[in-house]
Image: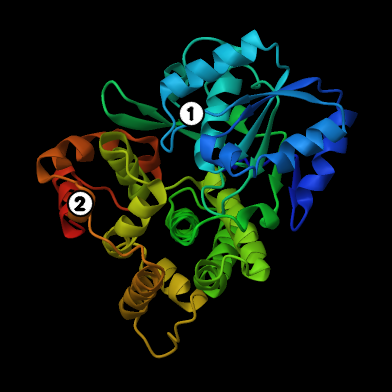
Amino acid sequence: MSNTFYMPPMSLMGKGAIKGLGAELKSRDFKKALIVTDKVLVEIKLIENLTDELALNGIDYSIFDEVKPNPTEKNMEDGLAQLKAQDCDFVISFGGGSSHDCAKGIALVASNGGHIRDYSKGVHTAAKPQLPLVTVNTTAGTASEMTVFAIVTNEADETKYPVVDKHLTPIIAVNDSELMVAMPAFLTAATGMDALTHAVEAYVSTAATPVTDAVAIKAIELIALNLEAAVADGSNIEARDAMQYAEYLAGMAFSNASLGYVHSMAHQLGGVYDLAHGLCNAILLPEVSRFNAQVKGQRFADIAKTMGVDISNMAVEDAAEAGIVAIEALSEKIGTAQKLADLGVQEDRLEFMAINALNDACSLTNPRKATTEEIVNLYKKVM
């Protein structure tokens, strides 16, 4: 069976990477950008790292800063209206996964027409490339700055769904670790666990390949070595730099091998309760991993070894469990080992979320198939 691998044709990475963006955009003769971001990044003036670079190179821009933490269909519709009104010829997202996902929705519909929901019925359904999209990343977690995924919230029916399309791949992705120093400790923790979940789910995915395996395992190694340090001291630029490479590698893995039940279940928690995606992943990852370890024991044993567990004298099932315990220990240390009930989740919504989770595209590559009842029980285990 043949495989296809997607990633941006250009990525600017490392400390000070954004300083190379303006000249690159100028060389491509772009005229005016719609900058898609959120109000916090504007208020703390972090966005000036981008706008100063654009101004220095004579590139005009209009800022759309209405992005919600779980970006909605309306966010994308409003951004598209501003793009057209301001006559922008390309899009730049500035922020984390919310900004990138919203920008992807705007750019895809701008060139293909219709509604973003139209592109959720299958995979790679858009006929044309999106309007040129450049992504400037300020978190180390979602990897949306370089993937073929965009996650969208439909407020009307309380669902959250992925759009998976090769045309969502940005033309340039920027990961500058100096832009990540401003991340609060808890956001660093939650986004870091999101990256770990990407790597773990990609590694055990039914669509995994030797290429995705390699980048997933390296991502897990870097996260195990650096996430706790990045949470403890946000100014630790070495840890920040390692985490931006880790989340990018994890993105390479899941953008091509896809994900599993952790993400399909977390999407529903975001749609119904508007909860932080990375935190939901952190809560769900251990129990879903135990469910999957029944059929992917050796893979979870590999994860244990990568996280520093000595598995030399362990049976495969014991090594797999030790890997999951190591994930739980890391989550506990950084403050993401929480319970859904404490976040307001009610048991009477679990079946609704379980049904939608099994209809989520991420469920297609989970290594062990579940019934609705089994998904409900997985939710209950972390209540």
Is disc 1 placed on a helix, strand or loop? loop
Residue 288 as seen in the image, left or right of residue 102: left
View extreme (bottom): residue = 313
Q: Nearer the viewer, mark 2 or mark 1?
A: 2
* Local crowd size for mark 2, using a 10 Å CA cut-off: few (<14), some (14–19), many (≥20): many
Query: What residue type is disc 1 on?
Result: Val
Seen in the picture, residue 88 relative to 161 is either above or below; the reply is above
The image quadrant of residue 274 is top left
Q: Quadrant of the N terminus?
A: top right
Hey, what amino acid is under mark 2? Tyr
Badge 1 is on which residue?
123
Front-lying residue, 266 or 210: 266
- Residue 7 seen from this side: yes
Can I make out residue 121 in this image?
Answer: no
Which quadrant: the C terminus? bottom left
Above-or-below relation of 279 to 315: above
Q: CA distance from mark 2 to mark 1?
A: 27 Å
Q: Position of residue 233 (x, y in %)?
A: 55, 70
Position of residue 303 in the picture relative to residue 89 (left or right): left
Percent of width and height locating residue 306: 51, 74
Q: Earlier in the sequence, mark 2 or mark 1?
A: 1
Q: Secondary structure at mark 2?
A: helix
Please report the residue visible at 22 percent of the width from the left and 38 percent of the height from the top. Answer: 353
Other residues around mark 1 within 10 Å, as few (<14) / some (14–19) / many (≥20): some
Position of residue 369 relative to residue 90, above or below, is below
> How far across and how far down the image is residue 110, in percent?
60, 14
Residue at the left extreme of this rendering:
348
**Which residue is denoted by mark 2 in the rendering?**
379
